[in-house]
Amino acid sequence: MKNLAAVKIPADLAVPASVVDITSDLSSMYPIIGCDIVQPLRVPDVKDALLWCDEEALCKVEPTFNVRASILARTPIFGDTILAGDNGEKIVNLQMAIPKVFFDLLQQEAERFVAENGNLTADQVLDAMG
């Protein structure tokens, strides 16, 4: 299978987003984000991309709130994620005009959120949701 460029967005804000190779087979994502099942989410402001999330992240002992992925998806996300290209039918190379600028801005927004709200636990995030 052909390798496709994607971006891993770790839940740990201290670990930068990085380019990773995946294939069109979903199982290629499992070891990268440390899971057994992934769930796709549309990203409102990123054309032709899906955010692949750990479907069972909240079942883990201490799920980690992923601030960057949550900002992208506009919904709470837990655990590491992968941002991959999507053409409506299959996973493709992630195409971004200026990826470094995009991820630098995302990092700054996430750091600002943490500065204002602290490092939220999964319980705090879920409680805030009602």
Image (cartoon, rainbow, N blue to C red):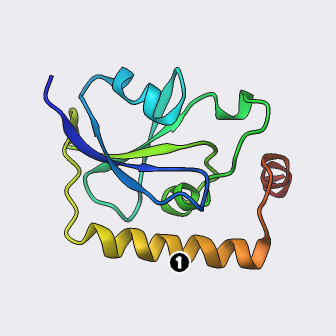
Q: Residue furthest front?
A: 15
Residue 94, placed above or below residue 25: below
Could you tell whether 127 is left or right of 103 in the image? Answer: right
Residue 80, placed above or below residue 55: below
Q: Nearer the viewer, residue 92 or 30?
A: 30
Q: Nearer the viewer, residue 75 or 118?
A: 118
Neighbourhood count class around disc 1 (C-alpha, 10 Å): few under 14, some 14–19, many 20 upward: few
- Residue at the (21%, 33%) spot, across then down: 89
Q: Element at badge 1?
A: helix
Residue 84, placed above or below residue 118: above
The spot of residue 43 in percent (x, y) is 41, 55
Looking at the rendering, which quadrant does residue 17 occupy?
bottom left
Q: Residue furthest left?
A: 2
Could you tell whether 45 is left or right of 21 in the image? Answer: right
The spot of residue 66 in percent (x, y) is 61, 53
The spot of residue 129 in percent (x, y) is 78, 54
- Residue at the (25%, 52%) spot, across then down: 48
- Residue at the (28%, 22%) spot, across then down: 25
Report if residue 79 is visible in the image: yes
- Residue at the (71%, 34%) spot, across then down: 58
Looking at the rendering, which quadrant does residue 30 occupy?
top left
Looking at the rendering, which quadrant does residue 60 occupy?
top right
Report if residue 85 is visible in the image: no
Q: Give the quarter of the figure containing the N terminus.
A: top left
Q: Amino acid at mark 1?
A: Gln
Q: Mark 1 sits on what residue?
A: 108
Could you tell whether 17 is left or right of 34 in the image? Answer: left
